Image (cartoon, rainbow, N blue to C red):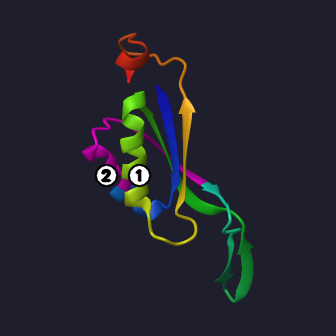
């Protein structure tokens, strides 16, 4: 079992959600996050004063998946979130050692 975490641009969320639904993902968790990578933030103008925005708004997706589904999920996220510009995001894959569905008590693959 794996946990696929993706950091993407907020306006790409609907495209990514549709793409991963097409490959059979039945659930995901979405969080609004802030951060920076190579972008290093940017400057904005507010009431005539320029200021530095160090942390940019992003969306973090988390998907628990079986090992065989991970490559299709990564491909779906990559193609749907791609703009070709800096800040498109990153995908991380983590091992899951144990999963429990609280409502039914199902564990591991059955809980996903």
Is 10 magenta? The answer is no
Query: Could you tell me if the residues under marks 2 and 1 are in contact, i.e. CB atoms within 8 Å?
Result: yes
Q: Quadrant of residue 36?
A: bottom right
In the rendered image of this protein, does residue 9 appear above or below residue 66?
Answer: below
In percent of width and height, residue 9 lies at 50, 61
The residues colored magenta run 16-33
Q: Secondary structure at mark 1?
A: helix
Q: CA distance from mark 2 to mark 1?
A: 7 Å
In the rendered image of this protein, does residue 77 appear above or below residue 54?
Answer: above
Residue at x-position 52% and y-position 17%: 98
Q: Which residue is mark 2?
A: 19
In percent of width and height, residue 22 lies at 25, 46
Residue at x-position 49% and y-position 30%: 2
Q: Which residue is mark 1?
A: 77
Label 2 vs 1, first from the N-terminus: 2
Q: Secondary structure at mark 2?
A: helix
Camera sees residue 101: no
Camera sees residue 8: yes
């Amino acid at each position: 079992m794996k946990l696929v975490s993706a950091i993407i641009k907020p306006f790409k969320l609907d495209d990514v959600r549709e793409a991963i639904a097409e490959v059979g993902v039945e659930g995901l968790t979405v969080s609004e996050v802030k951060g920076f990578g190579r972008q290093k933030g940017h400057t904005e103008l507010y009431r005539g004063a320029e200021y530095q925005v160090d942390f940019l708004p992003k969306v973090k997706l988390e998907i628990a998946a079986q090992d065989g589904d991970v490559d299709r999920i990564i491909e779906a996220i990559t193609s749907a979130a791609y703009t070709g510009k800096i800040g498109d995001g990153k995908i991380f894959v983590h091992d899951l050692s144990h999963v429990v569905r609280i409502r039914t008590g199902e564990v591991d693959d059955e809980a996903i």
